Image (cartoon, rainbow, N blue to C red):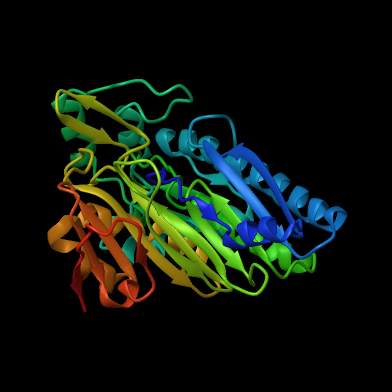
C-alpha cells in the first residue's frame, strides 16, 4: 500500500457563496474503500445527474477494491497463492494490463517501486484490517531480501501469469488508488461530468474547474493537523503523497511505516512525506506509484529519483521537517506556515 496521506479538499468558493446567501451547485459524496476515505465532488450539475455519476464511480471503486485486495479473497490474492505454489493462473485482461504497467514503472524506478514484495509488507504486519504492531525477526527479513522478488520475475503468456520466483507476492496498494483515479475520471467524462474533484485518501484528481476558479486542495502537514501548503489543481492534474504518518507503529523513538525499502527489507526512515504533481492520460497511476521511489531514495537521492520518473514537480519533507522541493512545484504552492523556508532545487 501507498503511504496514505489525507489531503484536504479546500473549496474556497463555498465561503464566497455562503456570504452571498447562495448554495453552490456542488454535490459531494463520501465512502470508505481501499482502506481509506474517498470523496467525490461534482460542480455545476443537477443533483440527480451528479448522484448517478458518483454512484457509478463508487461502485467501480468497490469492484477494484475486491479485485486488487492483497490478502482478502479476490483475483490478486488467488494469483499470489498460485505464485507461491509455482503454478500459473489465467487472469483477466485488466489485471494483465495492470501488471505490465506496474512492471514498467518498477523498471523505470530501478525497482524501488516494487509491488512484488507483498510478502515482506505482510511480514511487517501491514496486511491486516485491524493494524497491529509487528517487528519481524532479522533472519526472516534477510530471507525475503535474499529471495529478491521482482516484477520482472512474472511472465504472462496468452493471459496466464506465473512467476519463476515463488517469493513474489503482489501488493498493488501503491498502484490501485491511482488506477482508480484514472478509471473514475474516465467514467465521469463518459457521463458528461466536466467539473469534479476525486480524492482517494490523499491521491486527488481534478476535472475542469470549481466555478470561475480552479479546484484548490491542501497538502496535509505530516506532523500537525491541517495543511502544510495549498495549490490550485487544473483540469487533468493529479497530486499524490506518500507519508509515514498514517500506517505506522512506534518502538521507542523509532517510527516504522508501511513504506518498505525493498533493498534493505526495512521500513524507510528519514522521510516524513513526499508529494508529486502529475498530469496526462495516466496522471492518477503516476500520482500513486511514482512517489514511492522518491520516498525510498531519501533526502539525498529524491531529486535523482524524480528525474528518473520524469517528475518536474516534487517535494520531500525530511525527518527534521525540512522541506525540499523542485523549482517547478515551488511556483505552484502557497505554504500556510510562514516559518517554512523550503530548500529549492532545479
Q: Name the side, left or right, on which 82 lies relative to 94.
A: left
Q: Quadrant of the N terminus?
A: top left
Residue 120 image point, x, y percent:
30, 35
Residue 28 image point, x, y percent:
70, 49
Q: Quadrant of the C terminus?
A: bottom left
**Above-or-below relation of 267 to 230:** above
Residue 139 image point, x, y percent:
14, 27
**Which residue corresponds to the image point at 49% horizontal and 54% vertical from the top-left?**
203
Residue 311 appears in the rendering: no
Q: Name the side, left or right, on which 299 lies relative to 307.
A: left
Looking at this view, is 184 or 220 the one in front?
220
Looking at this view, is 123 or 184 the one in front?
184
**Which residue corresponds to the image point at 41% horizontal and 67% vertical from the top-left?**
277
Rendered image quadrant of residue 222: top left
**Which residue corresponds to the image point at 55% horizontal and 62% vertical from the top-left?**
205
Residue 262 image point, x, y percent:
24, 46
Amino acid at each position: 500500500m501507498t503511504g496514505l496521506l489525507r489531503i484536504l479538499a479546500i473549496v474556497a468558493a463555498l465561503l464566497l457563496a455562503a456570504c452571498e446567501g447562495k448554495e453552490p451547485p456542488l454535490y459531494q459524496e463520501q465512502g470508505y474503500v481501499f482502506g481509506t476515505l474517498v470523496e467525490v465532488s461534482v460542480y455545476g450539475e443537477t443533483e440527480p445527474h451528479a448522484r448517478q455519476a458518483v454512484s457509478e464511480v463508487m461502485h467501480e471503486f468497490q469492484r477494484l477494491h475486491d479485485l486488487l485486495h492483497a490478502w482478502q479473497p479476490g483475483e490478486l490474492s488467488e494469483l499470489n497463492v498460485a505464485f507461491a505454489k509455482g503454478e500459473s493462473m489465467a487472469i483477466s485482461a485488466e489485471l494483465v494490463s495492470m501488471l505490465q504497467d506496474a512492471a514498467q514503472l518498477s523498471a523505470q524506478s530501478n525497482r524501488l517501486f516494487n509491488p512484488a514484495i507483498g510478502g515482506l509488507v505482510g511480514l511487517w504486519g501491514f496486511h491486516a484490517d485491524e493494524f497491529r504492531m509487528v517487528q519481524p525477526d532479522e533472519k526472516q527479513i534477510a530471507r525475503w531480501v535474499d529471495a529478491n522478488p521482482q516484477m520482472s520475475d512474472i511472465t504472462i503468456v496468452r493471459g496466464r501469469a506465473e512467476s519463476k520466483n515463488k517469493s513474489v507476492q503482489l501488493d498493488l496498494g501503491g498502484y490501485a488508488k491511482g488506477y482508480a483515479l484514472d478509471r473514475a475520471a474516465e467514467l465521469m467524462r463518459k457521463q458528461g461530468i466536466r467539473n469534479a474533484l476525486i480524492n482517494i485518501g490523499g491521491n486527488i484528481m481534478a476535472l475542469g474547474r470549481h466555478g470561475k476558479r480552479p479546484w484548490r486542495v491542501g497538502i496535509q502537514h505530516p506532523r500537525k493537523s491541517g495543511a502544510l501548503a495549498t495549490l490550485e489543481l487544473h483540469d487533468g492534474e493529479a497530486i499524490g503523497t506518500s507519508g509515514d504518518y498514517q500506517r505506522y507503529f512506534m518502538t521507542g523513538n523509532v517510527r516504522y511505516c508501511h513504506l518498505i525499502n525493498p533493498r534493505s527489507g526495512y521500513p524507510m526512515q528519514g522521510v516524513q512525506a513526499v508529494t508529486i504533481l502529475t498530469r496526462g492520460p495516466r496522471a492518477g497511476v503516476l500520482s500513486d506509484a511514482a512517489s514511492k521511489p522518491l520516498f525510498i531514495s531519501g533526502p539525498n537521492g529524491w531529486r535523482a529519483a524524480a528525474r528518473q520518473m520524469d517528475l518536474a514537480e516534487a517535494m520531500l519533507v525530511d525527518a527534521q521537517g525540512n522541506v525540499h522541493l523542485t523549482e517547478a512545484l515551488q511556483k505552484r504552492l502557497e505554504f500556510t506556515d510562514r516559518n517554512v523556508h523550503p530548500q529549492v532545487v532545479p
